Amino acid sequence: MAVTYGEGVDSGVIVGADSRTSTGSYVANRVSDKLTPVHDSIYCCRSGSTADTQAVADYVRHFLAQHAITLDSKPQVKTAAYLFQKLVYNNKDRMSASIICAGWDPVNGGSVYCVPLGGACVQQDFAIGGSGSTYIYGLMDASYRVGMSKAECIDFVKKTISHAMARDGSSGGVIRLAAIDKTGVERFFVGGNDLPFTPQ
Amino acid sequence: MSILEYNGAAIIAMTGKNCVGIAADTRLGIQAQTVATDFKKVFKVNDKLFVGLAGLATDVQTLDQILRFRQNLYELREERPMTPKVFSNLLSNILYEKRFGPWFVEPVVAGIDEAGKPFLSEMDLIGAPVYTDDFVVSGTCSGNMYGMCETLYKPDMEPDDLFETLSQALLSSVDRDALSGWGGVVHIITADGVKSRVLKGRMD
């Protein structure tokens, strides 16, 4: 999931994800990293087929790098999201990739774009995806507030991901977070023992 | 998804020195969604005999009722408790009765016989039994559990050692399975009685 916080150029985003990759019911990787950088201050949260999303992210990283050179400045997050959209939409019959593209750029500040399975591209204040997201729509709607501080936002993301991990069999492991703002990217890690919520 | 994997389960039973242990997870799920974290899958038949039922949750509960009924009838008629071997055979018979429309459970029987010797058996959903003297496993992560048991098991463990071994084998196995876990229970059966403990494990 990805959430924006703050306002204007001081705004930023928090991206977060669980770490479980399953093949059927077997947990193939319990410490995977689903937060992938596509540029210095632009990350994507990958869900769906790992092979498809890794391939798409690699393509976007490649094109964005070229674009940044010709532009001679940091690319906008909406450009990255547009590239994701192009790839997902044009290959929709061959792929299963649901991606959230989020980051910070000097023009728009922090922003979040959701590129779900069909290849739409929608900008939102916050976005959630993956199989566990169905369990936290209500929680998100009830607890999200516009203009939260960075610390509040981090706690919010940790809490909601914990709730999804508690209910969804395909989500679990640890929580990986990245805070992206004008100063750059800061990565956080929440181990399984430190989850803010566990079922009784 | 297979009908036996609809709800998710993990059960291990092991023998020790004049004792047996049986451990199970406590998750009840509906495919990927977890619905309860306190679902009972191991049931006491009598003071020296436990049965663990892995598989479709509705059949787990129904078979528990059927087995308690049959065990009560046996005790009334025979005026003595059922021995593990007899119970295992009864269960096998009940399952095979439904050969062409089976109960979707794969049970595990663990107990101590009249002579104080540990007894284990496991069967498939149509009642084919397997008798071993070390460990039996059943559930959605049986491959993981076999691996853990083969590695951690040693013969003639004392009850406290047996508890540790069972717990570690179960917890490590369910942590690699998306359909089991979310808590566990372990019962250690000795000639003196049963000690049951709740396991604190990962709840994801």
Image (cartoon, helix red, strand yellow):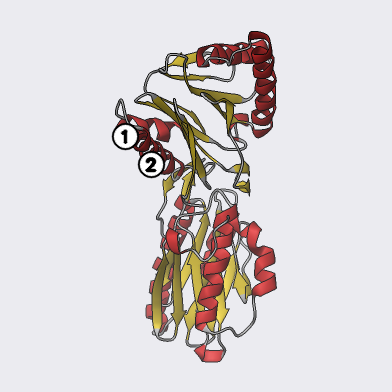
Query: In percent of the image, x 54 and y 70: which residue is there?
Result: A157
Q: Is residue A154 above or below residue B141?
A: below
Is B167 left or right of A170, judged from the image as shown?
left
* Residue in the foreground of this view, choosing between B36 and A157: B36
Residue A130 visible at all = no
Quadrant position of residue B28: top right
Looking at marks 1 and 2 on the same chain, the residue that comes earlier in the sequence is marked by 1
Please indicate whether residue B155 sits to the left or right of residue A15 in the image.
Answer: left
Q: Are marks 1 and 2 in contact (CB under 8 Å)?
A: yes
Q: In the depicted view, which residue is nearer to us: B105 or A160?
A: B105
Q: Chain of mark 2?
A: B
In this image, A196 relative to B70: left or right?
left
- In this rendering, the answer to whether A107 lies above or below B48 is below
The residue lying furthest to the top in this view is: B78
The vertical placement of B102 against B28, above or below, is: above
How far across and down, in percent of the image, does residue A173 sit? 45, 55
Q: Name the spot of residue A41 as percent of width and height, x first.
A: 42, 77
Q: Name the residue beneath numbered marker 1.
A: B152
The chain carrying label 1 is B
Mark 2: secondary structure: helix
Q: Residue at x 52, y 41 (%)?
A: B180
Type of amino acid at the residue the image marks with label 1: Leu
The residue that mark 2 highlights is B168
